[in-house]
Amino acid sequence: MTATSLRQNGFTLIEVLVSMALLAVLSMFSYQVVDVVMKVNERSRDTMASHAQLQRAWQIIGRDLMHLRPRTFADGLGATEPAYITNPSDFGIRFSRGGGPMIKSNPSGVRRVVYEINQDSQLIRTSWAITDSPRQTEGTTMVLLDNVDKVELNHLDKQKNYSIDWPPLNTSVSQRSLPRMISVTITTTDQAVTSRLFPGVVSE
């Protein structure tokens, strides 16, 4: 076999370099494809987790509002709060909820529930036994929903008028009064909007 034949059976340096360059390009494209697929999967998981969290939040909100009770609440400072009250200046809602376990320390099973949005854009639910005072105990707190921009409420009264505040402003109602119907609209930080309508409880 001649030297010319040996040279023809091997690879030249240029061919090796070209092959390595092509391999590097293919590897880069493969990495980009895998990275895109992983990001899509991660976004899909995040979307599913957010959807599941939203559905759980609505279930809890629905159970709370379906169990409204016309029960006033002592605030621990000598004053009495209405059975259901909103904060006119910012989102916040406080109400008495029945249907809880009837235990020795809280034989009625009624609890005081507070909803608010914290500084981390989370919808927070805190509750106390109706016999407790928020001035003395921290209550039981849970995060219902992340990435909340705002929560809007609309209440139907006995005269079939709607009001964002309860008790309705410039209206005299009993401290035990409850809305006939409550509309709740949640807007997330990515501007997704979801709403539910809940029947209230007929009261004084």
Image (spheres, rainbow, N blue to C red):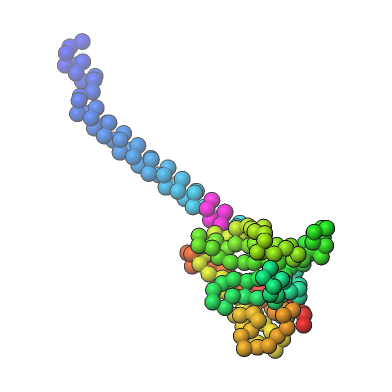
**x, y percent for residue 187:** 53, 68
**x, y percent for residue 6:** 21, 15
Please give the name of the residue rendered at 37% of the width and 44% of the height, measured from the top-left corner. Answer: 32
Tell whether position 46 is magenta: yes
| Picture layout, residue 21 above or below residue 201 | above
**x, y percent for residue 24:** 30, 35
Please give the name of the residue rendered at 50% of the width and 67% of the height, measured from the top-left corner. Answer: 149
**x, y percent for residue 57:** 63, 62
> How many numbered discs, if any?
0
Tell whether position 140 is magenta: no
Task: Tell me if residue 66 can be seen.
Answer: no
Q: Which is more toward the observer, 41 or 171?
A: 171
In the picture provided, is 29 more to the left or to the right than 103?
Answer: left
Which residue range is magenta in the image? 45-51
Q: Residue 11: name its quadrant.
A: top left
Please give the name of the residue rendered at 70% of the width and 62% of the height, measured from the top-left corner. Answer: 128
- Picture quarter with the N terminus: top left
In the picture provided, is 200 more to the left or to the right than 141?
Answer: right
Q: Residue 157: name its quadrant.
A: bottom right
Q: Residue 136: name its quadrant.
A: bottom right
- Picture quarter with the C terminus: bottom right
* Main secondary structure of the magenta stretch: helix
Task: Tell me if residue 76 can be seen.
Answer: yes
